[in-house]
Image (spheres, rainbow, N blue to C red):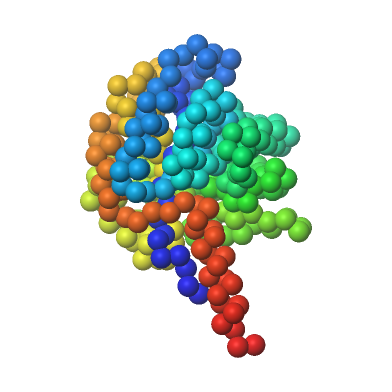
Amino acid sequence: MKKPNRKCIFSIDVEDWFHILDLPSTPDITQWDALESRVENNFQRLLDVLSEKKVFATCFFLGWIAEKYPHLVREAKARGHEIASHGYSHRLVYQTTAQEFFQDARRSKMILEDLTGTSVSGYRASGFSVTPQTPWFFEKLMESGYVYDASVFPARRGHGGMRTRRYAPYVIKDGSKEILEFPVSVAEVLGIPVCFFGGGYLRLFPYFLIRKMAYRVLKENRPLIFYLHPREIDPDHPRLPMNLQRRFKSYVNLKTTWQKIDRILGSFPFMTFETYIKEYKASLEDDKDADPR
């Protein structure tokens, strides 16, 4: 089966510096308005480098951010980027009920669709926090009207993770409904799945290793998904109080992120999740037309 030729996807989780999860110091949503925001300048800088490199990205907007800074959503859309949902209130999935999750996912989708005038197809959970303990997760996403999800972290992780060993995209069905899952990209090292392509992992590992593992994923004919938060290109952003282990994970190598992103955007051909799905569906139709039966 012919797959899309450009199999790299660059994604941005559009949130602010104070949205780090699961800390005693993490501010409540009622406090967010009073905090200094850095997301506007950081996201604008990312949009500019994406335009310079002629790369279209998928932007997973936190609904709260979209509500407060609607011009960021509209500008990203105007520049040709895909607008997708990161939920509204940035809560870990496994700390919500099924109904709370549904309402949050639906609320974000409606805000983004009102701002763009187009349908929002994709979702990514805060902290990739879908786990085996949230069996209703995909059902509620389908109920909310999402077409695809990019939340499964198929490896060990502080915020859960699902050790499925399913690394390529796959379809999840629930009766007549279905949703396409894009797991976080991992490469196996000594039989252990490791992520090299986003967040603290991308900041920690040197570029030559990221590049080597990227080609390993592509050789396995899987889409290679990079992900980034705007705060990660801003080494001067304020810090939340946290223990040494979390401080290392949250802030290691912030000064190296921009250079790595610049090299990554210049080294790989990119497309959005939305475009990947369209090209994949087109390839299925081509296969049908070529079927001699």
Q: Position of residue 38 (x, y in %)?
A: 40, 22
- The reply, left or right, for residue 159 in relation to residue 118 is left
Instruction: Decide if residue 85 is in sight here.
Output: yes
Q: Residue furthest bottom?
A: 292
Provide residue 276's location: percent of width, then percent of height: 49, 58
Is 145 rendered above or below residue 75?
below
| Image quadrant in which you'd find residue 130 | top right
> 255 or 4, which is in the foreground?
4
* Residue 66 image position (x, y, % from top left): 54, 29
The furthest residue to the top: 34
- Name the residue rendered at 58%, 38% in the picture: 116
- For this view, does 2 lie left or right of residue 218? right
Quadrant assignment, res 287: bottom right
User: Up-down: is 269 above or below 41?
Assistant: below
**For this view, does 290 lie left or right of residue 248?**
right
Residue 39: x %, y % from top left:
42, 26
Can residue 91 be seen from the camera position used here? no
Residue 97 position (above or below residue 82) = above
Q: How many marks?
A: 0
In this picture, residue 172 sits left or right of residue 80: right
The residue at 59%/79% (across/down) is 289
Q: Residue at x 76, y 59 (%)?
A: 176
In which quadrant will I find the C terminus?
Answer: bottom right
